[in-house]
Image (cartoon, helix red, strand yellow):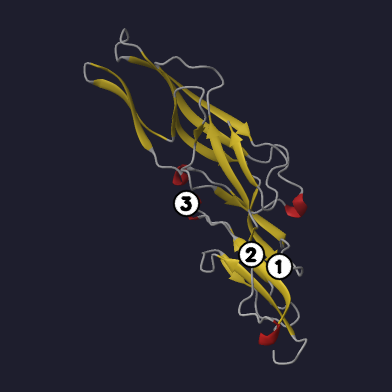
Amino acid sequence: PTMTGDMISFFAYAPYNATGITLAAKDAASNNTSLTFTVADNVADMVDFVAANAIDQEQKKPEKGGQTAVTFNFKHELSRLAFNVKSSLELKAETHIVVKAANLVAAGFTKTATYTFNNNTGENGSWRSLTGTFNATDLSGLTTKKTVELGKVDGKKYSESALADITTEKTVNLFDATKYLFLIPAENGSGLKDKAAAVTFTYDIVTEDANLANGYSVTPAEKTVYLPAGILAQGKAYTVTF
């Protein structure tokens, strides 16, 4: 703008080239301030979607201090989830809980939604038109699997590819340090509904014992646990400990 008092509003988002983000068609009525966001099918491809706005920015003359750039305060617009696991009881030194798999089931998570920028500087946008359901049948894309090898007699040993090896009361992060589930928030800030989503864990309880034929005992188990109601608020990060 060249006229005193002329103003421009700016809207920005990142990552700009992420798969699943589609800008609305250019439209003078809507000012092109919305986009469609789709959660990645592969959890390893999830992105931390952030957005910012700077409303009614006015050019300043050099003699009044000038203005060479517009400042953006990016806000996290999704919900972030991390999962920890631990034993509810103190384990003996020779006992391990080996988590082999973790899957989202009956997931009440949205697959696609429309994000609309706010018209007030620094305010979060809104999520509407929530459609589809996101189910992650395998969360291993968020963690580096390791091989757990225990118990060895006559060359035989317990060996499994695992997400986590729990040996004490210490909490173990199920995901790698920099990886999370990034999900579309519940509509209107209502949070996740009761029993809308759960995680099924498949694990072995392994006890090393040289008196046994293979040097260890194995008790396979499976447990499905519902995620707590009320989580999944916009811009919030959660750590759920199982």
Q: Position of residue 150 (x, y in %)?
A: 33, 22
Q: Nearer the viewer, mark 3 or mark 2?
A: 2
Residue 223, how many percent across, how many down?
55, 28
Residue 142 against residue 78 in the figure, above or below: above
Q: Which mark is residue 233?
A: none
Residue at 21% from the left image edge and 16% from the top image edge = 154
Q: Residue at x 73, y 62 (%)?
A: 123
* Residue sitting at the far top: 211
Check whether the beta carbons of the residues at disc 3 and disc 2 lie within 8 A of each other.
no
Q: Taking the image as drawn, is residue 164 in sight?
A: yes
Image position of 143 with respect to 39: above or below: above
Secondary structure beneath label 3: helix
Q: Secondary structure at mark 1?
A: loop
Labelled pair 2, 1 in contact (Cβ < 8 Å): yes
Residue 228 position in % (x across, y down): 68, 36
User: How many residues crowd around disc 3 within 10 Å: few (fewer than 14), some, or many (20 or more)?
Assistant: some
Label 1 environment density (alpha carbons within 10 Å; few <14, some 14–19, many ≥20): many
Disc 2 element:
strand
> Label 2 neighbourhood size at 10 Å, few (<14), some (14-19), many (20+)?
many
Residue to which mark 3 is pinned: 44
- The residue at which mark 2 appears reads as 51
Residue at 71% over, 67% down: 117
* Residue drawn at (55%, 38%) of the image: 83
**Picture coordinates of residue 202, whole percent (x, y):** 48, 30
Q: Which residue is mark 1?
A: 117
Tell me the kind of residue under disc 3: Ala
- Mark 2 or 1, nearer chain start: 2
Kind of residue indicated by mark 2: Ala
- 172 displayed left or right of 109: left
Q: Amino acid at mark 1?
A: Phe
